[in-house]
């Protein structure tokens, strides 16, 4: 068997791709995530996407939204974007539907593992990754392994308090967290709250206006990027990583976002860290699929070893 399937489950869409032994991404299928219909519908959609790929995969690796327990295979907690997802037996449910070895991981950890396998972090020992999109998530890799923390909840970069988010409600139920200032929905809400045009319906359009020099769009991106840069700079002081990677949809907003992010990050650094810069990942939206493929290959090897005994 020359392929596994890597799966990336998000709140709005799910992608599955054939991944070979070198981390190369092959045929890919993307389907809507039926999150509102509950966990059974989501698992059925994932299984259907895997079957549509064909190819006789050796195993399936899954990166999923939520706090994931890779050892137990379950979703420990999740936001309201995935109703009822907490408590789902992700590994067992997919194994029952597909009859294949299954490994599971948090989607941002999978993103980091993908960059460490074939992307921008391939030559780095310690990697701090932040993914800014619908939310703000993070991952810390040490010698290629995910640092999970005592409760498998490590990596929640979006829930650091920053001045720019003072008083704003966060999706976790708290307030003043960086996600409330720097995530995509927060940036778009900030644009509209400050008099943005009604015909501008998403952050991509705000970024396009910023490229044209629109003052409000530029200020909006600057505020969000500065908030995230401050949080990342503080984390870098604590962790002293070899590499800081930034990905996710918000990172595609162009230099109007990247420039204030870098400036705010640099302003926070202690003298020994000066010169460290946040950089974009190399794999883009495929990173989580590649990382899921990596744990899929590990599951395939583990299954083969068990069968040989």
Image (cartoon, grey):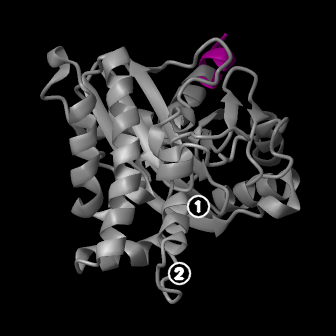
Q: Residues within 10 Å of mark 2 (few under 14, many from 20)?
A: few
The part of the image, by quadrant, that contains residue 35 is: bottom right
Whether residue 124 is visible to the viewer of this picture, yes or no, is yes
Frontmost residue, 269 versus 44: 269
State if disc 2 and disc 1 touch (CB < 8 Å): no
Residue 159, how many percent across, how many down? 57, 35
**Among all residues in the image, which is located at the extreme bottom?**
199
The part of the image, by quadrant, that contains residue 42 is: bottom right
Side (left or right) of 19 relative to 273: right
Q: Residue at x 27, y 41 (%)?
A: 264
Membership of 209 in magenta stretch: no
**Would you name the residue on which mark 1 appears?**
53
Residue 101, how many percent across, how many down? 68, 34
Q: Residue at x 54, y 70 (%)?
A: 193
Residue 260, how many percent across, how many down? 25, 51
**Residue range (magenta):** 303-309
Q: Residue at x 30, y 58 (%)?
A: 257
Q: Residues within 10 Å of mark 1 (few under 14, many from 20)?
A: some
Q: Quarter holding the C terminus?
A: top right
Question: Looking at the rendered structure, which numbered label has been put on residue 149?
Answer: none
Frontmost residue, 195 versus 100: 195
Q: Characterize the magenta stretch by its predominant secondary structure.
A: helix
Question: Looking at the rendered structure, which numbered label has been put on residue 201?
Answer: 2
Q: Is residue 107 above or below residue 220?
A: above
Which structural element holds mark 2? Answer: loop
Residue 220, how many percent across, how many down? 39, 64
Which structural element holds mark 1? Answer: helix
Number of the front mark, 1 or 2: 2
Side (left or right) of 100 relative to 206: right
Q: Residue at x 65, y 46 (%)?
A: 170
């Amino acid at each position: 068997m020359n392929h596994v399937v890597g799966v990336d489950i998000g709140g709005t869409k799910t992608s599955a791709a054939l991944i070979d032994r070198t981390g190369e991404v092959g045929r890919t299928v993307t389907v809507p995530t039926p999150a509102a219909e509950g966990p059974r519908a989501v698992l059925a959609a994932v299984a259907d996407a895997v079957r549509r790929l064909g190819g006789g995969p050796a195993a399936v690796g899954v990166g999923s939204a939520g706090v994931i327990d890779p050892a137990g295979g379950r979703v420990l907690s999740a936001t309201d974007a995935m109703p009822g997802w907490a408590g789902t037996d992700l590994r067992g449910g997919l194994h029952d539907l597909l009859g294949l070895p299954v490994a599971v991981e948090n989607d941002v950890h999978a993103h980091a593992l993908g960059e460490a396998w074939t992307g921008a972090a391939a030559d780095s020992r310690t990697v701090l990754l932040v993914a800014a999109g619908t939310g703000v998530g993070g991952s810390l890799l040490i010698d290629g392994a995910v640092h999970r923390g005592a409760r498998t909840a490590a990596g929640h970069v979006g829930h650091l308090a920053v001045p720019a988010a003072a008083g704003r409600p966060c999706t976790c139920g708290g307030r003043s967290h960086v996600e409330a200032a720097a995530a995509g929905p927060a940036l778009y809400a900030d644009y509209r709250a400050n008099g943005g045009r009604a015909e501008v319906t998403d952050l991509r359009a705000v970024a396009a206006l910023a490229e044209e020099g629109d003052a409000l769009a530029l200020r909006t991106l600057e505020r969000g990027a500065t908030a995230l840069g401050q949080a990342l700079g503080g984390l870098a002081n604590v962790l002293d990583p070899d590499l800081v990677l930034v990905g996710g949809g918000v990172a595609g907003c162009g230099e109007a976002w990247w420039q204030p992010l870098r400036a705010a990050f640099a302003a926070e650094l202690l003298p020994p860290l000066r010169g460290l810069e946040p950089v974009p990942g190399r794999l883009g939206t495929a990173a989580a699929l590649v990382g899921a493929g990596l744990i899929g290959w590990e599951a395939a090897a583990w299954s083969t070893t068990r069968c040989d005994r």
